[in-house]
Image (spheres, helix red, strand yellow):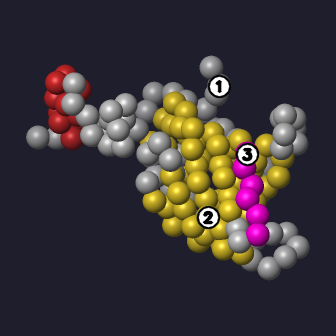
């Protein structure tokens, strides 16, 4: 039996599996985050990226933002309600630091496409929280 047939059968019977009663497995759904390309290309949607320039909105001003260069990311629970990762953060004027990432508030941004809207980044000496940029092709309703 194919995965799609199994999902259809479980949906029909009202059964699901995943994190909880509201989460079901959906075949063909991709979850991407926006990574700044650093060139004129702007944002690039990436699924489970090993490296990402994360852009976080500052306060209530949509034009104010900071970019965080993160490399060697290892993800857990990608595509679930909350994804977590560990990597190396490269600040612009300091030594690289280990960082823990938490992505949350999944958002459905089209047929078969999802993204995360919130990011929390923790280093040994600081915690940074904010809103993520939307990847190309995702728009708010």
Residue wearing tag 2: 100
- Determine which of the numbered discs, if any, sits on residue 27 in the image: none
Q: Main secondary structure of the magenta part?
A: strand
Q: Residue 42: x percent and y percent?
A: 74, 47
Tell me: residue 98, above or below residue 63.
Answer: below
Question: In the current view of this chain or complex, which residue is farthest to the front?
Answer: 125
Q: Which residues are magenta?
A: 125-130
Give the number of the mark in front: 3 or 1.
3
Residue wearing tag 3: 130
Tell me: residue 68, above or below residue 96.
Answer: above
- Determine which of the numbered discs, if any, sits on residue 140 in the image: 1
Q: Residue 37: x percent and y percent?
A: 71, 55
Q: Residue 48: x percent and y percent?
A: 51, 56
Give the CA separation, mark 3 to mark 1. Answer: 17 Å
User: What residue is rendered at 53% in x and 37% in y?
Assistant: 106
User: What residue is rendered at 79% in x and 49% in y?
Assistant: 40
Q: Quadrant of residue 49?
A: bottom right
Give the CA separation, mark 3 to mark 2. Answer: 14 Å
Whether pointer 3 and pointer 2 mark residues with C-beta atoms closer than 8 Å, the reply is: no
User: What residue is rendered at 51% in x and 52% in y?
Assistant: 83
* Mark 1 Cα shell of 10 Å, populated few (<14), some (14-19), many (≥20): few
Quarter occupied by the N terminus: top left
Give the CA separation, mark 2 to mark 1. Answer: 27 Å
Tell me which numbered mark, 2 or 1, is placed earlier along the sequence.
2
Q: Is residue 141 visible?
A: yes
Q: Is residue 124 left or right of residue 21?
A: right
Give the number of the mark in front: 2 or 1.
2
């Amino acid at each position: 039996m194919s995965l799609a047939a199994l999902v259809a059968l479980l949906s029909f019977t009202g059964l699901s599996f995943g994190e909880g009663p509201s989460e079901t497995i959906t075949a063909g759904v991709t979850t991407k985050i926006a990574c700044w390309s650093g060139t004129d290309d702007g944002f690039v949607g990436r699924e489970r990226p090993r490296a990402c320039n994360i852009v976080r909105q500052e306060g209530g001003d949509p034009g104010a933002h900071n970019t965080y260069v993160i490399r060697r990311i290892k993800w857990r629970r990608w595509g679930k309600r909350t994804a977590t990762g560990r990597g190396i953060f490269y600040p612009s004027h300091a030594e690289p630091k280990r960082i823990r990432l938490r992505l949350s508030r999944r958002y459905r941004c089209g047929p078969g496409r999802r993204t995360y809207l919130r990011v929390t980044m923790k280093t040994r000496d600081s915690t940074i929280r904010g809103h993520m940029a939307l990847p190309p092709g995702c728009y708010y309703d």
